[in-house]
Every structure is written in structure tokens, then in C-alpha cells.
Image (cartoon, helix red, strand yellow):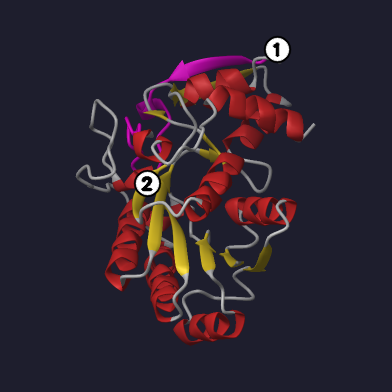
Amino acid sequence: MKYLVTGANGQLGRELQKLLSERQLSFVAFDSQQLDITDRKKVMSVFEQEKPDVVLHAAAYTKVDAAEDEAREINWQVNVEGTKNIADAAKKFDTKLVAVSTDYVFDGTNSGEYQEDAAVNPKNAYGRAKLAGELAVTESEADAYIVRTSWVFGEFGGNFVYTMQYLAESHSKLTVVDDQLGRPTWTRTLAEFMLHLIDTKSEYGIYHLSNEGTATWYEFAEEILKDTSVEVMPVTSEEFPQKAYRPRHSVMSLEKAKSTDFEILTWQDALKKFLLSIK
């Protein structure tokens, strides 16, 4: 079994490479310089040359606020056209595909948990592009898994955990929004689930994967900084305006993921393991 990882320099791409290496699995990994996924000819050429059995599609444009204006075009090119190229190549070369999507395909007005078949209604440019990318995967008719995730943190790259730790070094008080509810996700858990779907030959389709439990950003920050003297203060989203709309309640159901016999850590345990791993 040979894996191909896109987005090799990204937060998830690097986590996937670490996991594949630990498991001594055969893989090749390409960053955006080595493989511009918006270049259809290049994508087809790489698939033809490498002949992967599985593509782990972690490449994405993720600057949510920039996607609203100055990066609107690149957001669409990477998350839609690039994903279409990867999906079409997977279909052409009989490669299984695991593509990553987001809770931002939902509008965040649901009071319960979003099931995989819940109505989608993205409210920002990033969410609209990721949804169009999902549709491109489905329309390609490749053997594919789409894994929606949220609030991602991990060892590699910038994320909320590192931001809170960095700010805590120079601030005695921090304000964090307390009216957006979701599920934090450790990249390690996400990477393990992506390989689990392949290993268990699970049914193709859409899955939701985050760590167990819910939190507001304020609660997440409090847990991150609980062993420091920093005071975390709750504020409303109105007090912390951002360019792109954020869903207020984007809790996605984990039942389908659990039905594959994948064990999911709570986000608190995942955070604890992560923090220990980087000490």
C-alpha cells in the first residue's frame, strides 16, 4: 500500500507524515511547491508517476478571514479546483481518496449535533469553497471519504493552542469569545482516523471527526492555560469582530465515526497528551 500526501508542509500534512513514518508505511508527500494542486496536468503526471493506492488530501487554503476579500481567488482555486483535480486523478488512477473538509459548511444555527446528511449552508467564503470541494469529490465518483473536522490543533504550524501560549507569555489577562460552541480536534486523532477508514475498508462517504466533548473558545483557552497564572475573560463575538462569519454552534455528531470502531479521545485528554508530547 502506497500513500500520497498533499499539503506536506501543513499542520495536518506533517502529522500524517509522522504517523505514516511511525507505522513504517510507504508514502510520498508533496508540498505546494512540489505539487501545485491547481495545475491539473501536474497532478495527473504525479499520480501517473507515483501510482499511489491512497491519496490523503490535506492541502487547503485555510486563512478564513483573508478568503473574504484579498485571497478570495486563491481560496477558490485551491479548495475547489485543486480538490477537483485531486479527485479526478484519484478516479482516473483507481486511487482511494481521503479528503478533509470543515464544520464551516454549516451555518451554526442548529441547536443539536450536525449529522453527516444535515442541510449545509456555509456563511463565509472559505466554507463555500470547501463545500464546493466536497461536491467535486462526490461528482468525480472516486472511491472517497470526506472527513469534516473543526478547531484543529497540533504539533505543527500555527493554531489556537500555540496562540494562547504565546499571548500568555506577555499578558496577565486574555479575552476569548464564549458564544461559539464546537469540538476541538487534535491533528493526531484526525490523522489516525484517516488511516483507520482505509485500514477498516469503511463505507465511502462523509464522516465527521473531532475529539469527544464540546467547548467554547473560552473554555478551550481556560483548559490550555489552567496551569498558568493568566486570567481568561469571556467576551461576546460582537466584542471581538472578525471579517469572516464564524458558526455559533458547529457541534458535529461523532456517531458515524464511532460506528467504524474508532476510539475517540475527549478533547481534554487529547490536549493533555499533545501538551506532554511537545514539552
Position of residue 71 relative to residue 62, above or below, is: below
Label 1 is placed on what type of residue?
A: Ser
Please tell me in which quadrant of the rendered image residue 92 appears: bottom left
**In what quadrant of the picture does the N terminus appear?**
bottom right
Residue 251 x %, y %: 35, 31
Residue 260 x %, y %: 42, 41
Task: Give the foreground label among 1 and 2.
Answer: 2
Q: Which of 138 and 224 is in front in this view?
A: 138
The residue at 38%/37% (across/down) is 259
Please tell me in which quadrant of the rendered image residue 138 appears: bottom left
Position of residue 95 relative to residue 47, above or below, is: above
Magenta extent? 230-253
Q: If you read the primary sequence from the N terminus, does the residue marked by circle 1 or circle 2 appear first?
A: 2
Write down the residue under mark 2: 207
* One can see residue 244 in this view: no
Residue 229, numbered label: 1
Query: Could you say whether the residue bearing mark 2 is in a helix, strand or loop?
Result: strand
Position of residue 22 relative to residue 32, above or below, is: above
Residue 274 x %, y %: 68, 33
Gap in Å between the C-alphas at discs 1 and 2? 39 Å
Magenta span main SS: loop
**Is 249 left, or right, of 223 in this rendering?**
left
**Is 198 left, or right, of 224 in this rendering?**
left
**In what quadrant of the picture does the C terminus appear?**
top right
Q: Which of 73 and 113 is in front in this view?
A: 113
Query: Could you say whether the residue bearing mark 1 is in a helix, strand or loop?
Result: loop
